[in-house]
Image (cartoon, rainbow, N blue to C red):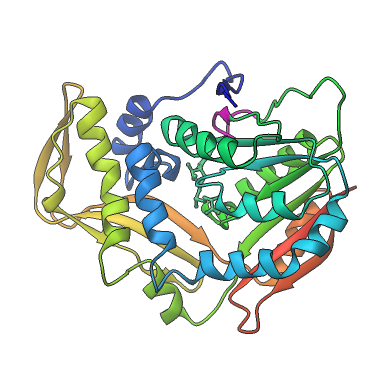
């Protein structure tokens, strides 16, 4: 099946990588939104992270989905349209699609367009009867996903604890917008849990250095797309756990005083100066359910593993 990628309608003030990077590099401290990790190379690096021994998130969430797929399918009901936010490799969606009764359509949304096109092609080959509506877009800008002509019930799917990449107030606002976009449907969401900080630290500082490559892909992408001249060896991947804020913070730290050129502009880095690239907030089951309530959802089922590493929540719209 050929499935053209649709583009989500953009907000008029649609941002672009160059403008945002230049604006973020002009701030003190320097910062950039983590969505810019994900060009095709970044998505492939994220797939490698998912297979790392230290990265318990993917295998724990996948095991939970597999174990509870029947229950989840019953809660979602038959002939539902699955809308997946930040769909990535689509591997987790396959578990749902296999369990659901006659899913009406699957609408994966991701910012990483070239990568999405590739994974959608292989999903289409494996699920020839499924109506596929891939969409390239930024869910932090627009969630205006057109309804299908027969307006089936929707269920949202937001795995991978991507919600943790938003500060709590922004996460609350995003959940509210998702609830509106789901037109009364529920949301199945994966949320990483507060735990032993050593486990968290290891997950973002893997021995093979794949997370470091993923972090530095931001600079490599700026070199590829924006005529920048970042020296990747002159920056260190640094990802401490901030226990007070219950989040991993990810930085690229300048190893020396240096000047970088980007789109004809010169940017100064002091020795030791950080560029903040990502946060990954962790929740307790209770603190996440409380936020879901504030966003207008009724938290219903929650599944977690024996070690309470990860949680999956089924939230119904109020
Ligand atoms: C942490 S990964 C999770 C991938 C996959 N859902 C999983 O569970 O393994 C985040 C995914 O969300 C996408 N993404 C990040 N920010 C986004 C945004 N603002 N809008 C749309 N997609 C985004 C990335 O391209 C990536 O595929």
What residue appears at the point 57 percent right and 71 percent down from the top-left corner?
60
Q: Is residue 25 above or below residue 264?
A: below
Give coordinates of residue 43: x percent, y percent.
40, 45
Q: Nearer the viewer, residue 247 or 105?
A: 105
Task: Identify the residue at image location x=71%, y=53%.
Answer: 98
Residue 149: quarter of image: top right
From the viewer's perspective, tell me whether residue 182 is left or right of residue 308: right
Q: Outermost residue toward the right?
A: 318
Q: Is residue 270 visible?
A: no
Task: Please tell me whether residue 307 is drawn above or below residue 183 in the rendered image.
Answer: below
Q: Is residue 138 magenta?
A: yes
Q: Is residue 233 left or right of residue 135?
A: left
| Res 69 → quadrant | bottom right
Q: How many marks?
A: 0
Q: Quadrant of the N terminus?
A: top right
Q: Residue at x 66, y 69 (%)?
A: 64
- Confirm whether residue 205 shows in the render: yes
What is the span of residues highlighted in magenta in the rendered image? 135-142
**In front: 95, or 184?**
95
Q: Residue 241: which quarter of the image?
A: bottom left
Let me know if residue 141 is in the magenta part.
yes
Residue 270: image location, x then y, percent: 15, 49
Q: Is residue 190 left or right of residue 14?
A: right
Q: Chief secondary structure of the magenta span?
A: loop
- Of the pair 106 and 170, the residue shown nearer to us: 106
């Amino acid at each position: 099946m050929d499935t053209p990628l649709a583009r989500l309608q953009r907000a008029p003030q649609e941002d672009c990588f160059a403008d945002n990077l230049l604006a973020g590099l002009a701030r003190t401290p320097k910062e950039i939104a983590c969505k810019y990790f994900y060009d095709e190379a970044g998505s492939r690096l994220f797939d490698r992270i998912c297979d790392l021994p230290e990265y318990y998130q993917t295998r724990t969430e996948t095991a939970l989905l597999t174990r509870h797929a029947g229950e989840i399918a019953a809660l979602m009901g038959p002939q539902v349209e699955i809308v997946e936010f930040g769909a990535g490799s689509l591997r987790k969606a396959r578990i749902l699609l296999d369990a659901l009764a006659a899913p009406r359509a699957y609408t994966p949304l991701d910012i990483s367009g070239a990568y999405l096109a590739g994974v959608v092609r292989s999903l289409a080959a494996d699920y020839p009867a499924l109506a596929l509506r891939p969409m390239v877009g930024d869910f932090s800008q627009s969630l205006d996903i057109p309804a299908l002509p027969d307006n089936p019930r929707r269920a949202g799917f937001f795995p991978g604890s991507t919600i943790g990449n938003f500060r709590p107030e922004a996460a609350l606002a995003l959940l509210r917008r998702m609830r509106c976009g789901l037109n009364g449907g529920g949301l199945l969401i994966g949320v990483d849990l507060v735990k032993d900080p050593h486990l968290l630290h290891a997950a973002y500082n893997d021995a093979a250095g794949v997370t470091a490559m993923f972090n530095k892909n931001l600079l490599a992408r700026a070199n590829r797309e924006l005529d920048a001249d970042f020296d990747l060896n002159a920056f260190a991947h640094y990802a401490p756990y901030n226990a007070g804020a219950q989040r991993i913070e990810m930085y690229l730290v300048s190893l020396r005083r240096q000047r970088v050129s980007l789109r004809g502009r010169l940017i100064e880095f002091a020795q030791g100066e950080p560029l903040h690239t990502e946060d990954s907030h962790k929740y307790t089951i209770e603190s996440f359910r409380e936020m879901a309530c504030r966003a207008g959802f009724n938290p219903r089922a929650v599944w977690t593993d024996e070690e309470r590493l990860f949680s999956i929540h089924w939230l119904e719209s109020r």
